[in-house]
Image: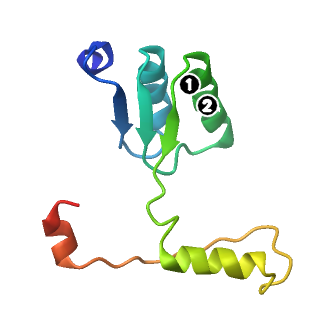
Amino acid sequence: MLLLFNSPNIDVITVCTPSGFHLELISAAAKAGKHIICEKPLEVTAERVDEMIAVCAENNVMLAGIFPRRFNASSQLLKKALAQGRFGNNAMADAYIKWWRTQEYYESGA
């Protein structure tokens, strides 16, 4: 892993480890001057996310989280309905959605 962090040919590190193991890798990558793309959730506590943000800011690197469904049609429809007040005054929401993908999706390498 140190080879990745020390290589001048690598600008961005992608962190895809299990939740709860992101902070240490992100800290090391940021200190090595690498930009970071991280799978969700970024971390398991708000405090750990704050540490990640701070170390990236201190080292002037970008930190980005992966949210692949943010712009799909159903997410945008929900956003619009919330903005229109169709569900009343919402302070918080939680959802469990089973997204389904065909076998062709997995075979495509996408």
Q: Residue at x 78, y 87 (%)?
A: 86
Q: Check contact, mark 1 vs mark 2: CB within 8 A.
A: yes
Q: Quadrant of the N terminus?
A: top left
Q: Percent from the top left, x then y, of residue 18?
A: 39, 46
49 or 18: which is nearer to us? 49
Q: Which residue is mark 1?
A: 56
Amino acid on which disc 1 is placed: Cys
State whether residue 9 is above or below residue 109.
above
State whether residue 39 is above or below residue 63.
below
Side of 87 where 43 appears, left or right? left
Q: Determine the secondary structure under disc 1.
A: helix
Q: Residue at x 43, y 78 (%)?
A: 98
Q: Quadrant of residue 28?
A: top left
Give the label on residue 96, or none: none
Q: Residue furthest bottom?
A: 86
Amino acid on which disc 2 is placed: Ile
Q: Quadrant of residue 38?
A: top left
Q: Quadrant of the C terminus?
A: bottom left
